[in-house]
Every structure is written in structure tokens, then in C-alpha cells.
Image (tube, rainbow, N blue to C red):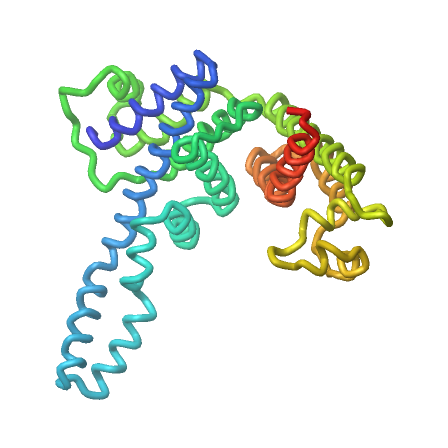
Amino acid sequence: MQRLELVIVQLEEVERLIGIGRVPHLRLAHILLDSAAELIMHRMAKSELDHERYHFDQLENLRRLDAAGRGGAWCSDEIRRLEGIVVSKTRRKKIDNNFGDKIDFLVERGRLPADLGPVLKKLHEYRNETYHRDQHRVEVIRSAVLIYFDAACTVLEHYEPGTMIHSNSLGPELRRLYEDLPRPRDLFKLPHLAAARLREEVGLDIDTVRSALRDHLLSRLADLEDGLAYVQENLTSTDVMPGDAIRVMQIQDGDLDAIFDSEVLRSRPYPLTMSDIATWTARATALDNLADKHALFTEFGAIEDCFEELEQKVRKAVWDIDEQANMR
């Protein structure tokens, strides 16, 4: 039970940080949530792989036998059979080391719902930004943390500990859950009870979260359009045409012809046009139609991924223009 207690205490600390609600506390909450989700998934993946340990070891022994020239046709046939039913060394290493590979494996094995995968992966990207690169999505951090808390509870719901031994040294976080179990107490129900209790206490106001995510995207897309218009106004070419700014933002490094010749610029097959911004805006507005929390955040992340690279380039271009004009 101590292994479960590690996770429960971590999630209850997240609950406390959410209650404070300030950005520094929400940042810590996000990091703790990511750690808790990965810890549970590590245990789930390890349990799944341990179930095939006998066949994995058998395969390794047969490979050594075959490499020594003492196998024969039967050995090759058995190697091929076992390779089809066990996870390879290479993939085992990826599952052990990578957040996304853990998710893919557990979804593939039916241990986690498929619609949870994109949510966890996107929120893990946010965690890497705030933890490794000092980048904090302040405008949506509360919504992201609330969704991650709910997602972590879903992971906890699907966690099935292999063994559960009662301990008299439990802290108050797990003891209150233990005491709420119906008699005779089934220790294996603790993860499900904990997930339900935590989710109920924190809550997820989907309408408020949806509005925050929608408004955030629409604001950024409006700024993107304004930035492109500003770049368009400051292009030095004598024959500027609508859409040149977004084309300029997509010029490949070293493509001097496109930089200095407008006709060449317009002949290049760039993937993005101004109509894409209208499409993203329509998709952001359509978030109002999504009631499912996983679908909501998956679509939010997908829209964000569509324009984030362009957004960064436009911001830099606007900054450079203002720098050259001594406006900063």
C-alpha cells in the first residue's frame, strides 16, 4: 500500500496547490501531475511486460543457441514464433525511457483508453516547456492543470496493483480512503476509490475550461492576423500582393531567389495561406460544440500545433521590424 500512498499523497498535494491557484503553484501542480501519471504508467507497463518474461527469456536463450550454431530449423521456427508474441528489447527500452511510448504501449494493450493518449502527450509537452525551458503558458495554465488532474485520475482508475498489503503505518491521505472501503475491505478497490474522491473534490467545470481554451486560441489567432498585416505593411518590395507576408514567413533557409524575387516567392508551394487562419479560427470557435473533455483538449492541442510555429516566426518578424525602426 505504500506504493499507492506515494501517488495519493502527490495528487493530494496537487489538490492543495490548485486551491491556492497562483501561477507558481499551478506550475508545480503541473509538474507533480506529470510525475504521478508517468509513475503509474511505468508500473502498469512493467507489470504488463513482466507477464511475458518467461517467453522473453526463452527467446533470448534460443537466440544464443542459434548464434552458436547449435539450433537448427526448429530453433529458427521457434524464434520467429516468439518474436511475434513478445515485446522486443528495442521497444522495451523505449517504453522504459519515453513518456509517449508508455502511453502507446498501454493503449495498445487495452490498459488505457485511446482518447486519453493525445491529452497526456500534449500536457507532457507543456510540462517539458515549463520544467526544462522556463516557458509557461500562463493564460491556460489553470485549465491545463484541471484537465491534467482529471486525466491523472483516469490513469489511476486503470491502475491495478499486483499486490496490496495492509500497513499500520499509513498516513492520513490513504487511511481515510481505506476506512471508507466497504467491509470486507477490498484493498484492490483503493485506486478506483481514490480517483473518484479526488476528481469529486477538485471538480472539472467543463464549460469554464472550454471557454478559456476557446478564448485563448481566438486571441492568439487575432494577434497572428494583426502581426501578419504589420509584416505585410512593412515589406520592402515594390509590388506587394496580398498573402506575401505569410509566404515570406515560410521561406526556406538559403532560398535567396524567393527572398529577392517576388515572382519566385509566389511560385513556391508553401503549405500555409491566409485561408488557413480562417479555418483555425472556425475550429477554435467550434470548440463550443465539444462536450467530451478529452476531445476538447485534443482538438485544442491540434489547433495550437497548426499555427504555433508560424506564430513564433511572425512575432520575431514584428520584433525585428520594430527594432530596425528604433521603436524599442
At a point 74% along the width and 42% down the height, the residue shown is 277
At a point 38% along the width and 21% down the height, the residue shown is 14
Examine the rendering and report whether any part of residue 289 can be seen.
Answer: no
103 left or right of 209 in image? left
294 left or right of 195 in image? right
* Residue 64 position by quadrant: bottom left
At a point 59% along the width and 25% down the height, the residue shown is 209
150 left or right of 277 in image? left
Of the pair 274 and 245, the residue shown nearer to us: 245
Please say if 223 is above or below 59: above
Please say if 101 is above or below 41: below
Of the pair 182 and 87, the residue shown nearer to us: 87
Of the pair 73 and 272, the residue shown nearer to us: 272
Percent position of residue 216, x then y: 64, 27
Of the pair 96 and 85, the residue shown nearer to us: 96
* Residue 192 position by quadrant: top left
Q: Quadrant of the C terminus?
A: top right
Q: Quadrant of the N terminus?
A: top left
